[in-house]
Amino acid sequence: MFRGVAPPPERSSTPLPPTMTTTPEPGAALLLLIVSQLPGIGPSRARALLNRFGATPALLEADYDALRQIPGIGETTARETAERLANPAWRDKAREKGENQLARAERLEASVITILDPAYPPLLKEIYDPPLLLFARGNPEALCVPSLAVVGTRKATAYGKQATEFICREMVNNGYAILSGLAYGIDMMAHRAAVESNGVTIAVLGCGIDRIYTDPAGRLWPRILERGAIVSEEWIGIKPEPGNFPRRNRLIAGLAQGTLIVESDIKGGSMITASYALEQNREVFAIPGSIFSGTSRGTNYLIQQNHAKPVFSAEDILAELNPAQHPALKTHPEASEPFDLNIEESCIVEALQSGAMHIDLIAEKTGLKIDALLVHLFELELKRIIEQEPGQIFRKRTP
């Protein structure tokens, strides 16, 4: 099982070419950063350019006649691309932007992994439109560990959180990394369960790797970096715009051997991730739920349509992903270290010693305001110290 964080690979320096120029030729990462700024040149067309010219400066010297002969480029795109490549001002500006990205990555101690690198995740290369580059913080080797994507609604129920924790802990104990989107709800619980089980977890963002907006206080993401990676195809500094998330969902499905949908309505990001996984010929799993629960309509639909295998334990997943390697389920993960509670959390736990109680009564006993209390209750749930019942009732968790 993959554990710990290996030191990042040393960056190789590209020597100056034997010419009189004082400007070094761009390396593969910089070259692809420049190419990705060409309008109309997405991942598929960029790969066609690489197939024709290679990751060499010749790509930036391509003229209209050479470009129009490349399948999938087309005359209009070939003409517009040739005009930009022949424009020194455009090339200088594109190079400056690319160099800025590499500098920002270095400041973050992040890796820029190109589709040409041996470190590029092999599973991701198999999808229809793999990204040219990945920005990764933490250990890039984590991206090549066998993994299960676990996604679901931001409005997770107690049932959904418990199911997520149960499945993720078992999968980690059986050698799998947990991959999710670091969103509120199910995603956060999946990452949390993985790190608490001393496992590997990968967070895929729909923004730059410097903008971890769902965990600004750093309660979880530093621990993810210790045991895995935070990755994105979006450039550093990019904000979490709505249009980025379908691409993020495609990346989640593409990096993992299979995708588990825990809770979702009929529409939503989790269902988009499931559709990408199906398109990529990856396994899709779903946690069945109550027919009266809106958060289970999507998962129940996937099962009903035979798009997803119903899951009752990690054994159901392991039987599909790698039955030969995992003939038997290991069910006793290593104990995680006890948590240090802050003053507010300690007060809440003390109040619940007498038994389950409503959130209003907890607020009265602890003197905490409801909005602050909700944050501390969520943290205690993630730490597996308390659990929530229907009707905003909370109780101490039974060991």
Image: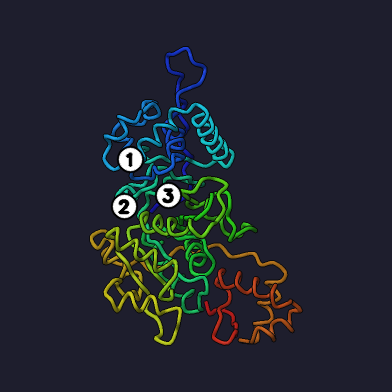
> Residue 218's quadrant in the figure?
bottom right
In the displayed structure, does residue 129 sit left or right of residue 104? left
Residue at which label 3 appears? 142
Q: Kindly identify the residue that appears in the image at 48 percent across and 56 percent down.
A: 244
Check whether the beta carbons of the residues at disc 2 and disc 3 lie within 8 A of each other: no
Which quadrant is home to the N terminus? bottom left
Report the amino acid beneath label 3.
Ala
Residue at which label 1 appears? 47
Vertical side of 311 occupied by 84: above or below? above
Residue 68, x across and y down, in percent: 30, 35
Q: Residue furthest top?
A: 20
What is the secondary structure assignment of the residue under circle 3?
Answer: helix
The mark closer to the camera, 2 or 1, is 1
Vertical side of 337 occupied by 264: above or below? below
Q: Nearer the viewer, residue 138 or 237?
A: 237
Residue 170, x across and y down, in percent: 39, 67
Query: Label 2 to label 1, Cα distance in Å?
Result: 13 Å
Q: Earlier in the sequence, mark 3 or mark 1?
A: 1
Residue at which label 2 appears? 127
Q: Kindly identify the residue that appears in the image at 33 percent across and 69 percent down.
A: 285
What is the secondary structure assignment of the residue under circle 2?
Answer: loop
